[in-house]
Amino acid sequence: MSKRLTIEEIDKKISNIENYYWKGHKATSTERIDWWSLSDRMQLGRLYKLKEKRESEVSNDKDK
């Protein structure tokens, strides 16, 4: 069974992907997204959804 990623680990993965494409480019954000590979865009989507899920789990745990 795989280890659950923490919010910090998810943020780091998101940052690594975004920095790979944005570093040193002067284009606007909409132009930059066109350069990204499909797999990276899909992975970012999954990571953002997972981050939202983890944040809601943490907030639900605090409410108990």
Image: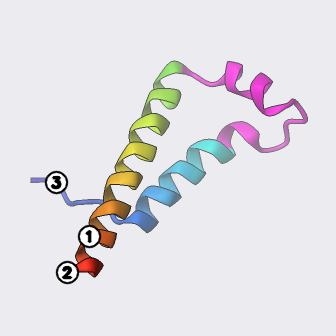
Q: Position of residue 39 (x, y in %)?
A: 46, 24
Colouring scheme applied when the structure was drawn: rainbow
* Disc 2 crowd, CA 10 A, few/some/many (<14, 14-19, 20+): few
Is the Cβ of the residue at disc 1 closer than 8 Å to that at disc 2?
Answer: yes
- Considering only order in the chain, which callout, 3 or 2, is on the residue closer to the N terminus? 3
Tell me the distance, in whole angstroms, between the alpha carbons under discs 3 and 1.
23 Å
Q: Position of residue 51 (x, y in %)?
A: 40, 54
* Mark nearer the viewer, 3 or 1: 1
- Residue assigned mark 1: 60
Q: Is label 2 in a helix, a strand or a loop?
A: loop
Q: In the rendered view, would you say 58 is above or below 52?
A: below
Residue 61 included in the magenta stretch of the image: no
* Span of residues in magenta: 20-37
Q: Is label 1 in a helix, a strand or a loop?
A: helix
- Considering only order in the chain, which callout, 1 or 3, is on the residue closer to the N terminus? 3
* Mark nearer the viewer, 2 or 3: 2
Which picture quadrant has residue 49?
top left
Mark 3: amino acid: Ser
Residue drawn 49% across the image and 52% down it: 13
Which picture quadrant has residue 64?
bottom left
Residue drawn 40% across the image and 64% down it: 7
Mark 1: amino acid: Asn
Residue drawn 33% across the image and 71% down it: 59
Q: Which mark is residue 30?
A: none
Q: In the rendered view, would you say 36 is above or below 8?
A: above
Q: Which mark is residue 64?
A: 2
- Residue assigned mark 3: 2
Residue 30 included in the magenta stretch of the image: yes
Residue 53 falls left or right of residue 33: left
